[in-house]
Every structure is written in C-alpha cells, then in structure tokens.
Image: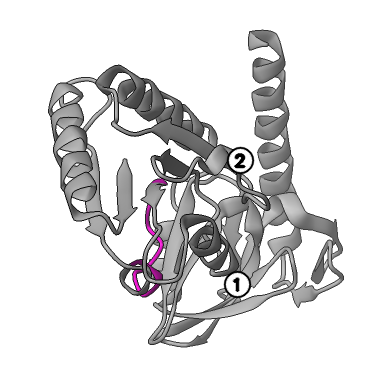
Amino acid sequence: MHLAICDDHMADRKQMERLLGRESDRRLNTTGVLYVDSFGSKESILTTPMIYDAIFMDMTEDGCDAVELSHMLRADGTDVPIVFCCDKVDYRKSKNLPDNALFLDKPIVVAELTEMIDHLLSIKNSKAQKLEFRNQTDTIYLTENQISYAWPESNRHVCIHTTDSREYTTDMSIASFCGTLNKYDNFILLASNTVLNMRLIRSISMFKVTMQDGKSFRLGFGEAKILRKSVDACMEKLAQGEKAQEEEA
C-alpha cells in the first residue's frame, strides 16, 4: 500500500515516518510493505502524481490548512481516504470536510494507527483496481469498467473512449494496451484493431457492432459470429460471479 504524509510540522512528520516504518516492518509477512512518501508543503504534494492509497494530513501553516488542501487534491482527481491528524486543530469540527475523511489524534497511538491501516487496507482491497496510462503530459488512471472502447491513432498512440464520454490519447501501441487489459475477460480485439468492452455492447449485426453510447464499428466477414460467442461467454461469466457474491452474502 502506498501512503503519503503531508504535515508541515517537521517533528510530527518525522515521528509519523518512524511509526509507519515500524508498522511496515510488522506487516512484512502478512499484509505487505507500506511505501511512504513524506511532504512538508502543499506545493510538494500538489505537484506529485496521485499514486497513493491514502494520505495522512495535518497542515496549519503557510496560509493553507489541511481541509483547504484536501479540496485542492479532490479537485485534482484524488479520491483516496484522507486521514486528518488532529492536534491544535480538531478537524472533526471543521466545516466542509471532503468525502472519505478519517481521523486520528496526536500524539499518535500505535494501536490506533494499526487499526487505521487495517481499515485503509480493507478500503483499498474493496475498490476496483485502477489502470495507469501515460502520455507526454499526463498520467491517466481508469478502472476497467470505465473503458468503453479504444483504437490505435498510430503505431505508438491509442485513443481510449470512456463511459463518461471522455477521450484520452496514450503513448503506447495497441499491443501494449491489450497487454494491460490481459487479465480482464470482458475486452476483445477486433480485426480492425479496435478494442471493445463486451459488457457495453448494445447490438451485433452481420457487419456492424454498436456500443451502448451509439458508436458503431465495422466487422469483417464472419467476425460477428465470433463476437457473439465471446459476448455470451463474457456475460455468462459475469452472471456466475454475481451469483457467487450473492451466495457469499
């Protein structure tokens, strides 16, 4: 699990680094290593790619408190839990707290920190895994369910169309893109090198497949039959998974 500390109190920041380091050592053979980055200013964390599973935060200096910074991070697309570490400021009483806010009291109690890490791990494990795509200026994080279809713009670029009608161009070949999706059974590569999320197909005719958003793609001779079989298998596996989850519940 990747964690960030954002605390403008140097002594507190160093203490949290030590506590998380010891917590990581205890978890080495159980839940795994904790990877920790530490920041002492809002500028440093705002310019860092948001790769974290949770952020521990206490900011009171430099004209920017932790709640204000948390909203900046949310505006940048960070939706991970933010653990407000309460000391001079009791963030529980703050107005306009962001979604997914948690709280710890300073000085940090080891048992409470351990309990918090367990909770953060359960949140992480329950969330859909995000896939990372890059271009020259941005890093894009998407879940497999957000990807509707994709096609190569060139030998080195793939355009991804998402379920919320956004499009992202990534610096990768269509082969690399398919490799990223390799463990997911709901994607299929057409003869035209277009990749489709089979869960989002609306209809299939002899020479055309139409997605739920109305976008259509041409099919080669005999490709419709293969696609129908693949979609049927995909939906059957999805139904089996949902049934298994209901039985476990």
- Residue lying at 63% horizontally and 49% vertically, measured from the top left: 97
| Vertical comparison of 25 with 243: above or below | below
SS of the residue at dot 2?
helix
> Contact, CB < 8 Å: mark 1 with mark 2?
no
Q: Which region is colored magenta?
A: 45-54
- Residue lying at 17% horizontally and 40% vertically, measured from the top left: 15
Mark before the other along the chain sequence, 1 or 2: 2
Judge whether residue 126 can be spotted in this image. Answer: yes
- Residue lying at 32% horizontally and 51% vertically, measured from the top left: 4
Disc 1 or disc 2, which is closer to the eye?
2
| Vertical comparison of 205 with 115: above or below | below
User: Quick check: 87 left or right of 193?
Assistant: left
Find disc 2 in the rendering and name its residue.
Answer: 93
SS of the residue at dot 1?
strand
Q: How would you rate the neighbour count of disc 1 (Cα within 10 Å): few for under 14, some for 14-19, many for 20 or more?
A: many
Gap between marks 1 and 2 measured at Cα: 46 Å
In the image, residue 143 lies at what x, y percent?
A: 56, 53
Judge whether residue 181 can be spotted in this image. Answer: no
User: Quick check: 131 left or right of 164?
Assistant: left
User: Quick check: 24 left or right of 210?
Assistant: left
Amino acid on which disc 2 is placed:
Lys
Decide which of 137, 227 is in the foreground and name it: 137
Give the residue furthest to the front. Answer: 88
- Residue lying at 31% horizontally and 22% vertically, measured from the top left: 114
User: Quick check: 50 left or right of 184?
Assistant: left
In the image, residue 64 lies at what x, y percent?
A: 46, 67
Give the quadrant of residue 225.
bottom right
Find disc 1 in the rendering and name its residue.
Answer: 150
Look at the image and say whether residue 46 sits in the magenta stretch: yes
Decide which of 126, 224 is in the foreground and name it: 126
